[in-house]
Every structure is written in structure tokens, then in C-alpha cells.
Image (tube, rainbow, N blue to C red):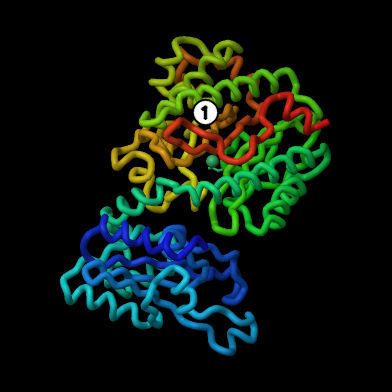
Amino acid sequence: MFQQKTYIERRKVLKEKVGKGFILFFGNDESSMNYADNTYHFRQDSTFLYYFGIQHPGLAAVIDIENNREILFGDDYTIDDIVWMGAQPTITERAELCGVENVQASVKLGAALNLAKQMGQPIHFLPLYRPENKIKLQELVVIAPKEVANKFSVELVKAVVSQREFKTAEEIIELNKAVDVSVDMHVAGMKFAKPGMTEAQVTAEIHKIAIAAGGNISFPIIATKNGQTLHNYYHGNTIKEGDLFLIDAGFENPMCYAGDLSSTIPVSKKFTSEQREIYRLTLDAHQAAIDALQLGKPFKNAHIAAGTAIFEGMKSLGFTKGNADDAFEAGAHSLFFPCGTGHMMGLDVHDMEDLGEVWVGYDGRPKSKQFGLKSLRLAKPLQPGHVFTIEPGIYFIPELIDLWRSQNKFNDFINWEKVNSYRNFGGIRNEEDFVMTESGVELLGKPKPKTIDEVEALRS
Ligand code: GLY
Ligand code: MN
């Protein structure tokens, strides 16, 4: 945990921003796999962590703004629990660490919220993603199940985003640590992969680094010869000479800050000439995106720069034709790059995605509905303290090629014969993490091997 004063200050700012009413926070519960006591890895809710720092299941908290009263709700373990789990801090001891003075049993939460209702005070709560918390909310605040998703407090969402989006110096230290270990995970995987191995064997090598560093992974590891499938969590294939191999993996450090990196390697010692040409284009697009990052200017500029660079680069190889700006406007580049250039990162790998991308990445403005652009999670102007990824890639997705070709889509921009001849090429992506500062953008963590020479040096 950070020092107590960090959490006290964060809650003080939140109270000022929200101004009125009761704020209700749910922590996460244990989540069972196949019977009650056999649980998935416990992960605290990130907003709960941000304001209270406690990595422990079964908690909730209420902030009564008018009376400046903060209450943590939870139940101490019984001796039966302690026999199985060992001695545990009490809820009061945990509350003390984050500066909350009042502790009550979970069963009292309903009474605290009834008080708010009696006082005619609004109860602010966030959008909920865990079913058990949705059920608790239905019971406690008496909201019809289908209304839970619509009745969250936009005011609270905006207030939380306006704090969590700006990473402080102590958070940047944690993020640097998380990215450093993420780099170690990638280097381990990039060196380890050999023809004849399964994707699962490489995945295990990457995961091992995260566990040994005392944390875990910030999202399920992508380690695949089918990098054209954007979130490919299948690890059952055997890799062979000539394959490309894409790794997208990140560390979640003990404070729950995330890293998120991607790398692409040849399974052979060297890239083929075709792989090398496309790889070079992804590096150009990556650099074009970084060059477009400017303090006070929209992140969308980086996406435009990456998308047009990809289209332009693909033109130089004969895959595309026509004007790159027109092609981007029409969305033709998204045949090869059907996703976004990056997203915010922090306590979540896609930071605050549970609160809504429109609030986190667009300042409340609507997102585009265009294929490709609709997957851009961050578009708004960059401010000091914003932490985000840069991850353009080039993907040959056979199903998308076939569909758009059959529809005669983008015939003015795409050379379909040439594209079709690469239909089994796969996908290439590099991904790095950055922080915007007063003096410009800075790479987080140590540099990850990325150039063709750096990657091939790891494969020899
Ligand atoms: N690293 C996974 C993603 O950004 O979606
Ligand atoms: Mn990412």
C-alpha cells in the first residue's frame, strides 16, 4: 500500500468533486471456480484499491459527504477461518492503514444506505461488472436488476476518472516497475520459443517470470502463431520454422499496477524477407504514432498517424493504392489494422474500462461507429500524468479479406490479389507504454527489444 495520507487525500478530493450525497463502493469478493472454497486468483476492484488500498475480499465502503464520515464494511475472520488461513489482520487494522476511522459489520451496510434515503441524499455508485455486486446493489438500494446498468452515477464516474487518469509520481514508480518486469517476461519468451514447442510451453516461460517477481499477469497471456487474431488466448498449436510468433503480455505488480507490451518474433532464427518488410512497416507506424504524441493534443492524432503510415507503407509494397488520407477517412486501412493504437493503463491494463470508454477516453463525447475506429479506446487530448500504450499492428485476417473482397469493398484502395496472396501471413505488433509529462512523452520501463536486429539477436 501507499502511505495512509495518499488514500486520505484521494478521498478528500473525491468528496469535493462529488459535493453531495453518499458514495457507495464495492470491493470484490472471492470468485469460486467449481466449488465455494476453490477460488480464482483474487483481484480487488481497482477503484476500491485507489481510494482504500486494501487487497482483501468482501469489503464495501460508504462516504457520507455531508457529515464527512467514512465507513468501511467487512467481517473479521472467525477462529474456524483462521485455523485454515492463518492469522489475518482485522478489518479495523486494515481500515487504519488507509485512514478510515469507522468500521462496521457487512450486515450494517443496508442501514447506512437507508439513512441516506431518509436524509433525501443521492446514493452514488459506479457501473458494476461483478454479478455478486450487482445483486448486492439490487438488495441494498432496491433497484430493479435491469436498471442497475443505467442508474450508476455519471457524476461519480467523471470524478473518479478525473483523479485516476492522472498518475502521480508514486504511481509512475509502480508503473515503471510493472513495465520492467513485463520487459523481462517478453525477453524470456522471445529467447525461449523454438520450433517444435507448443504455444503453451512458451506461455509458461513468460508467466513464470511474473509469478517469480511476486505479482501476476495483468491479463491472460497472448502467445500465438496466429497473431492476426487480436485477442488470441489459445495455446494449443505447435510452432515451426517460418512461423511468426506474437506475444502480448504484461505484469501486474504487487500494488496491482499493470504493464502491457507486445512483441513479434520469427520462430526461425531470422525473419523471412516478406516478414521483414511488413515488420519494418509496423515499426514505421509505431514511430509515426509516437511522433504524433503531443502535450495537449488528442491521442487520436497518434491513431491517424499510425493508420495512414500503415496504408502508405502497404502501398509501397503493392497492397494498397490511392491517397492515404482518403483511405484512412474511408476506413480502408482497417483491413490491416482493425483496432486502436492504444489505451490508458494504470491499475487496470485497460485503465478504468469498467467506468466506460466514453468517459475515460473521449471526455464524454460519442465514439465513432466506423469499423476499426470504434475500437480506439483513447482519443482525447493528452495531459501530464496520462499513461497509455502505443500498439499499432498489421494483420492479415483471412475472414475479413474474404468478406470485404466479396463485397467489392474498398476496390479503389486495396489490391485484392496481392492481399489474398498473403492471407496466411499472420500478424505483427509491437507495444510499448508511455507517460505524458510537461516536457513531452516518456517511455515507461526499460526499452524492450524491438528493431529487427534486436529481435534476431535474441533468436540466435
Ligand atoms: N494487451 C491487450 C490489449 O491491449 O488489448
Ligand atoms: Mn494493450
- Image location of residue 40, percent across then percent down: 59, 66
The answer to whether the beta carbon of the residue marked 1 is less than 8 Å from any atom of ligand 1 is no
Q: Evaluate whether residue 406 shows in this view.
A: no
Q: Which amino acid lies under the numbered mark 1 shown in the image of this protein?
A: Phe
User: Dot 1: few (<14), some (14–19), or many (≥20) neighbours within 10 Å?
Assistant: many
- Image location of residue 117, percent across then percent down: 20, 73
Work out whether 451 lies above or below 81: above
Residue located at (35% from left, 54% from top): 160
Residue located at (21% from left, 63% from top): 20
- Image location of residue 457, percent across then percent down: 78, 29
Q: Which residue is mark 1?
A: 337
Q: Nearer the viewer, residue 408 or 219?
A: 219
Task: Point out the image quarter for the C terminus.
Answer: top right
In the rendered image, which quarter is residue 232 located in?
top right
Residue located at (34% from left, 39% from top): 362
Work out whether 227 lies above or below 45: above
Q: Evaluate whether residue 140 shows in this view.
A: yes
Q: Secondary structure at mark 1?
A: loop
List the single residue furthest toward the bottom.
Answer: 79
Residue located at (51% from left, 27% from top): 290
Q: Is residue 184 left or right of residue 51?
A: right
